[in-house]
Image (cartoon, rainbow, N blue to C red):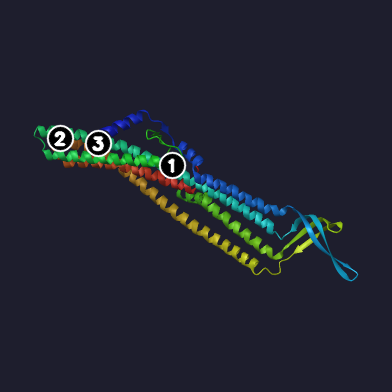
Amino acid sequence: MKKILFLSFYLFLSALSAAELTLDACIEKALKNHPDIKRLSLSVVKSKSFVDIAKADYLPQINLSAEYNPINTFVMPQNSQFNTIEDESWKVSAQLNQKIYDFDKTASTVKAYEKEQNRADMTLQDAKALLVYNVKNYYNLALLQSKALKARQKDIQTKEELYKQSLALVKEGLKTEADASSIQSALYIAQDDLAITYSELKKALSSLSLYTGEEIDEKSVLKESTPPKEQNGRTLTQNILEKNFSLKGSKEEIQRDALLYEASKAQNYGSIDAVASYTHQDTLNEYDTSLVGVMLNIPIYSGGRISAQSQQAKISKEMAKESYNAQKLLLEEEVSALLIDLERYRHTIKAKEALIASAMATKSIVEGRYKEGLSTYIELLDAASVHLYAELGLLEAKFAINNTINRLEYLQGELQ
C-alpha cells in the first residue's frame, strides 16, 4: 500500500513539473541524430563520386613522366666492332589521350551510376520514412501507457474505496471477512498491474530517447497529435505503388543494371582515341620527339572476360526485375492485410465504446446493491474488471489503428 501511494504521489508531482513533448519534435530530433540517417547520407555522397569517376572518361587524360639514369651503358658500332660507353641519361615526356568515341560505353556507364545515385537516395528516404514510423510507434506506445496508467490509478482508487466500505460492512455484520480479503487481493493485483504499466511506460520513453538521441524526462507530458488521416483503399494502394521509396529504388536498380549491360556489350567494339605526346631525351645526344594521331583499339581476344562480364550484367538485370516484382507482391499483400485490420479495429472501437457505457452503468448499480448487501463481492469485482477491461481495450484499439495508419503512411513514403 505504501509503495503504490508513493508511486501515485510521484506521478502527481511529475505531472505538475512536467515539460511538454510533441511528436513533431521527436521526429525532428530522430532525423537529425540517428546514425543510420547519417550513414546513408554519406552513402548518397559516395555514390555521387562514382558518377564523377565515370564522367572522367569524357575528359582528356594527361600524364607526365620523367626518367633519370646516372649510369647507362650505350653500345656504339665502330670499325666493325662494338664499343660500350657509360654515361648518364635522362628523359621527360608528356602524353595526352582524348577519347573520341567508345560506342556509348562511357555514356551508359555514367547514366548507370546516376541511377545508382538515385537508388541510394531512395534508400535514404526510405530509411527516414521508416525512422519516422518507428518514432511514431514508440511515441504512441508511451501515450498509450500514460493513459493506461491513469485508468489503472482510477481503478485502484475505486478498489481502495470498496475495500474501506467492505471493512465497514464487516464491522456492521453485513459482510464477512472473506469479502474484505477478496477485495484487498484484487487491490494488490491492481497495484501490481499499475507498476507493470509504469514499467512499460519507462521502456517506451527509453526507446524513444535512443531514437531521438536525447534523454527524455519521465516527467514529460506527451501531447496527443492529430489523428492520422484515412484514405480510400483503392486510391491508397495505387499511391503506395507509385510513391513507395523502396519500390522506386528497385526501379532505379533495374534501369542501372540495364545500362551496365549496355556498357558491357559496348566493350566488344573498343574505342577511338586521339593521342598526342612530346618527349625530350638527353642520352649521348639531346633531341625531342612528338606525336599526334588517332588510335583505334579493338579487343580481339580477352580470355572470355568481356563476354563473361556481359553475361553477368544481363543476369543482374533480370534479377533486378524479379526482385522488383517480388517486392511489389509483398507490398500489395501487406497493404491488403493492413486495410483488413483497419476495418476490424473500427468495429473493435465501436464495441469497446458500447461496452464502456454499459460497464459504467452496471458498475454503478452493482456498487449500490453491494452497499445494501444485495450483491456479492464477486459481482462487484467483475463489474470493476469489465469496466477496466473496456477502457484499456479501447485505448489498445486506438493505438492499433494509429499504428496501422502510420504503417500505411510509411509505405507511401510519408516523412512526417
Asked if residue 128 can be seen in this view, the reply is: no
Q: Residue at 36% x, 47% y: name it.
A: 345
The picture quadrant where one finds residue 358 is top left
Q: Is residue 127 left or right of residue 9?
A: right
Q: Is residue 302 left or right of residue 378?
A: right
Picture mark count: 3
**Does dot 2 land on a helix, a strand or a loop?**
helix
Q: Marks 1 and 2, how far apart in space?
A: 47 Å
Circle nearer the N terminus (3, 2)? 3
The residue identified by callout 3 is: 156
* Residue drawn at point x = 65 percent, y = 56 percent: 109
Q: Residue furthest left?
A: 173
**Marks 3 and 1, how far apart at CA:** 32 Å
Circle 1 residue = 210
Q: Tell whether 12 sits left or right of 30.
A: left
Q: Of the residues shown, which amino acid type is indicated by label 3?
A: Ile
